[in-house]
Amino acid sequence: MDKSTVGEPNRGLMLRIAEAFEKSARHFAGENTRLAKLGAAVRKTTPKGRVDLMDGVWVDFEADKDTVVTIQPGADRQGLRLILEDIGSSRWFSFSYSLQADGLRTARYVGLLIRADSTGLAAFRPCLRYLLDDGFKDRFPPSVIVLSGGEDEQLCFLKVDPELAAQARGAEILFFFEGRSFDVTLLEIENLHI
């Protein structure tokens, strides 16, 4: 057996998958470009409630609930570091950003390619929020993103509801973090139109 051909079919498949991901990211190019600049745009802060990090990107939790958090750029200004020391009595802690509703209308799924680093265990549930004239509707994937320490890259798919996408005047992606404390750096987030 010629060892030089071992793995060749897999390499071809992986190249086709990578090309498909690249093409699918173009539908959300504005969002992906904005998220790529996050580490350079953010200043260290210790907010007491919702804080806008840049246009269309924010961190949210209930104000006046004794939440202790530090938000800062990641190492070498790469990505966004979230250090939640204590969630206090806030019912949620989320990192969120806006997403064009037009991109949803032709998608079956929104894929999230997430590269993150954590100190210890951390988990969050991504959410696709449809902004409607009479409020909003949230849709979640069946699984949670779990980070077990160190750098990791994960892929998550959020099924698009065609009826809600047609009605939506806007959309958001939210990462609802679980637990009382964590230290996570979101190094890269890429939205994929699938």
Image: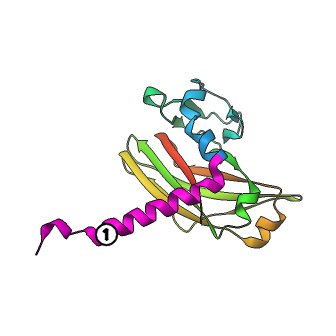
> From the viewer's perspective, is 185 left or right of 46?
left
Magenta highlight on residue 89: no
Query: Which amino acid lies under the numbered mark 1 shown in the image of this protein?
Result: Asn
Q: Is residue 32 left or right of residue 145?
A: right
Instruction: Please give left or right for residue 165 compared with residue 33 in the image.
Output: right
Q: Position of residue 64 (x, y in %)?
A: 71, 33
| Along the line of sight, the residue nearer the viewer: 71 or 155 | 155
Q: Is residue 92 visible?
A: no
Residue corresponding to mark 1: 10
Q: Secondary structure at mark 1?
A: helix
Q: Dot 1 surroundings within 10 Å: few (below 14), some, or many (20 or more)? A: few
User: Quick one: 186 or 60, which is closer to the camera?
Assistant: 186
Quarter holding residue 46: top right
Residue at 78% x, 67% y: name it: 164
> Which residue is farthest right?
133
Q: Which residues are magenta?
A: 1-29
23 inside magenta stretch: yes
Q: Is residue 149 above or below residue 44?
A: below
Q: From the image, give the main secondary structure of the stretch colored magenta.
A: helix
